[in-house]
């Protein structure tokens, strides 16, 4: 008697891949001093992957674009919006408005997409999206601050 069904090796592997890709993004966020880090990003990616895998196992269909799987994906997108909304903070201090957490919310949103891609079996797309997201988090941060620095010099 097998304890682990051999048919579940791919879903188990995909869950681990999704977790690791999310952890990669969360590590960058932790290094940037953000509150949502490796555990949060890893869990979001793995959770999205898990929901896709479960929907595929519970209602196997011959057409991978069937409405049932699309409803699960739609629910993930809406659900992650609530988590992202909780990450966004708006404060008003001495006639100055400040909003923070928008990049974290966007990062969690893309992380759910990465996990869903792994759940659907599109690991290469998920890896590419992870690399592109890391570029957005780091490379574009440097570019943004370089441009902002030039604008600050013009204002002086």
Image (cartoon, rainbow, N blue to C red):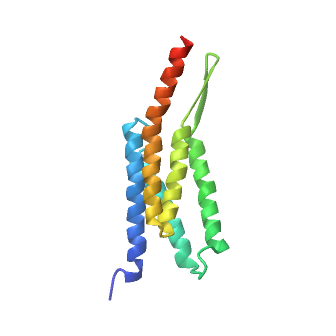
- Residue 5 visible in rendering: no
Q: Quadrant of residue 17?
A: bottom left
Q: At x 61% / y 50%, what residue is drawn?
A: 81
Q: At x 34% / y 81%, what residue is drawn?
A: 3
Q: Where is residue 86 shown, x and y percent of the image?
A: 57, 42
| Residue 70 sits above or below residue 94 on the image | below
| Residue 127 sits above or below residue 27 on the image | below
Q: Where is residue 101 shown, x and y percent of the image?
A: 54, 37
Q: Where is residue 147 shown, x and y percent of the image?
A: 50, 27
Q: In this image, 7 relative to 100: left or right?
A: left
Q: At x 61% / y 56%, what residue is drawn?
A: 77
Residue toward you, 4 or 152: 152
Q: In this image, 103 relative to 123: left or right?
A: right
Residue toward you, 29 or 94: 29
- Residue 24 visible in rendering: yes
| Quadrant location of the N terminus in the rendered image | bottom left
| Residue 121 sits above or below residue 85 on the image | below
| Residue 59 sits above or below residue 12 on the image | below
Q: Where is residue 151 shown, x and y percent of the image?
A: 54, 21
Count of numbered badges drawn on the protein:
0
Residue positioned most to the top: 156
Q: At x 52% / y 62%, what residue is drawn?
A: 116
Residue toward you, 36 or 13: 13
Q: In this image, 79 relative to 21: left or right?
A: right
Residue positioned most to the bottom: 1
């Amino acid at each position: 008697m097998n304890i682990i069904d051999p048919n579940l090796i791919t879903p188990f592997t995909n869950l681990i891949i999704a977790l690791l890709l999310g952890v990669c993004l969360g590590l960058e966020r932790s290094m940037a001093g953000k509150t949502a880090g490796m555990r949060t990003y890893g869990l979001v990616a793995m959770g999205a992957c898990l929901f896709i895998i479960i929907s595929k196992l519970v209602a196997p269909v011959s057409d991978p674009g069937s409405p049932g799987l699309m409803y699960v994906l739609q629910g993930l997108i809406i659900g992650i919006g609530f988590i992202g909304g909780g990450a966004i903070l708006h404060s008003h201090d001495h006639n100055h408005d400040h909003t923070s957490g928008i990049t974290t919310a966007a990062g969690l949103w893309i992380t759910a997409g990465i996990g869903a891609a792994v759940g659907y079996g599109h690991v290469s797309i998920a890896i590419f999206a992870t690399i592109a997201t890391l570029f957005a988090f780091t490379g574009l941060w440097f570019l943004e601050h370089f441009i902002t620095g030039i604008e600050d010099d013009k204002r002086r």
